[in-house]
Image (cartoon, helix red, strand yellow):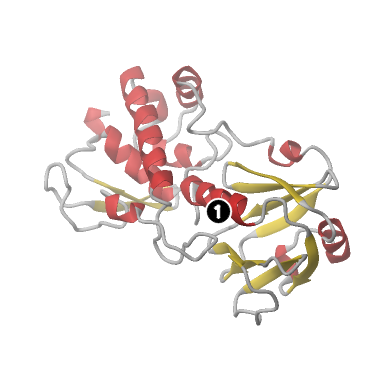
């Protein structure tokens, strides 16, 4: 699933390619991903211009000239592709195609597994995502400590809870916990202030670097121009089961925590050290 760094990379690509363009035509190929009536969806997009593009957690928010907001979540395998050519044939996994006026290109939403969603928000767009927690790069340590000290859960599922912190998924949770030397099963209320500070700093460091490198292209992720990110070459534990820990040379293990796979070093990330 695209996480915060991947979605932020998409946002930056969209700003370069579609900001200011006017939508001429909308074609929908897989209606179930459109979370509202198709005529209403198309009507609100066609003849509207792209005025602002932003992100909240893993959600893409596109402000339209008609005062409404086009909200998209990429799900597990979703991609937004911009192509300069118009009228290209439909691709296998196309969900929808947006054609811009003056032959200024097309935006395609592809999603192999069809877990993404897209729709028009007519009221305050933030109301649609009001249950999301703060942004990892904006949350202060004081707020971070208050959030995670108040819940009695294992730290890995807590990091994945979008109502606590918005935008982190499996990749960046595993990498941040490794950086902070915290076992994924450690309960949040048993983490010292020092350990929470280490984790807060680790999350910021890793997400910033992931954004700088275009995100992690594991499985199928690419940006709006079809280019791969390369943060995956900096992964220390995610997807590294059986490989040597880069710090201590112990073998990386994979366990299931809260129904999600977690990769960690059993020597660097001992529960007793958390």
User: Given the current orientation, which residue lies at the most extreme front position?
Assistant: 102
From what the image shows, is residue 99 above or below residue 74? Answer: below
- The residue labelled by disc 1 is 13
From what the image shows, is residue 5 above or below residue 224? Answer: above
Viewer-side residue, 122 vs 63: 63
Viewer-side residue, 95 vs 46: 46
Answer left or right for 51 relative to 215.
right
Answer left or right for 92 relative to 5.
right
User: Given the current orientation, which residue lies at the most extreme bottom position?
Assistant: 89
The picture places residue 70, in percent across and down from the top left corner, at: 74, 51
Give neighbour class at mark 1: few <14, some 14-19, many 20+ (Cα, 10 Å).
Answer: some
Q: Residue at x 47, y 62 (%)?
A: 222
Whether residue 116 is visible here, answered yes or no, is: yes
Quadrant the C terminus occupies: top left
Answer left or right for 206 relative to 144.
left
Viewer-side residue, 9 vs 20: 20
Q: Element under label 1?
A: helix
The picture places residue 25, in percent across and down from the top left corner, at: 80, 68
Q: Residue at x 75, y 69 (%)?
A: 31
Answer left or right for 155 relative to 68.
left
From what the image shows, is residue 17 above or below residue 166? Answer: below
Q: Residue at x 16, y 52 (%)?
A: 251
Whether residue 183 is visible here, answered yes or no, is: no
């Amino acid at each position: 699933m695209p996480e915060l760094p991947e979605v932020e990379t998409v946002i930056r690509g969209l700003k370069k390619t579609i900001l200011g363009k006017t939508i001429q035509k909308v074609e929908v190929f897989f209606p179930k991903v459109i979370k509202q009536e198709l005529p209403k969806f198309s009507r609100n997009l066609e003849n509207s211009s792209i005025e602002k593009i932003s992100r909240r957690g893993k959600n893409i928010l596109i402000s339209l000239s008609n005062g409404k907001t086009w909200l998209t979540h990429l799900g597990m395998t979703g991609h937004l592709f911009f192509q300069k050519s118009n009228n290209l044939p439909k691709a296998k996994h196309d969900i929808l195609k947006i054609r811009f006026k003056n032959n200024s290109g097309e935006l395609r939403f592809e999603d192999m597994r069809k877990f993404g969603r897209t729709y028009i928000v007519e009221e305050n767009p933030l109301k649609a995502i009001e249950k999301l927690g703060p942004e990892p790069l904006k949350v202060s340590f004081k707020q971070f400590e208050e959030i995670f000290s108040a819940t009695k859960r294992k730290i890995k599922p807590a990091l994945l809870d979008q109502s606590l912190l918005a935008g982190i998924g499996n990749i960046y949770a595993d990498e941040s916990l490794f950086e902070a030397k915290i076992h994924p099963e450690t309960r949040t209320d048993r983490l010292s202030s020092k350990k929470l500070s280490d984790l807060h700093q680790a999350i910021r460091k890793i997400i910033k670097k992931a954004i700088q490198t275009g995100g992690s292209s594991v499985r199928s992720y690419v940006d709006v121009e079809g280019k791969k990110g390369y943060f995956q070459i900096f992964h220390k534990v995610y997807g590294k089961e059986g490989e040597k820990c880069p710090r201590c040379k112990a073998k990386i293990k994979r366990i299931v925590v809260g129904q999600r796979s977690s990769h960690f070093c059993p020597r660097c990330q001992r529960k007793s050290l958390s």
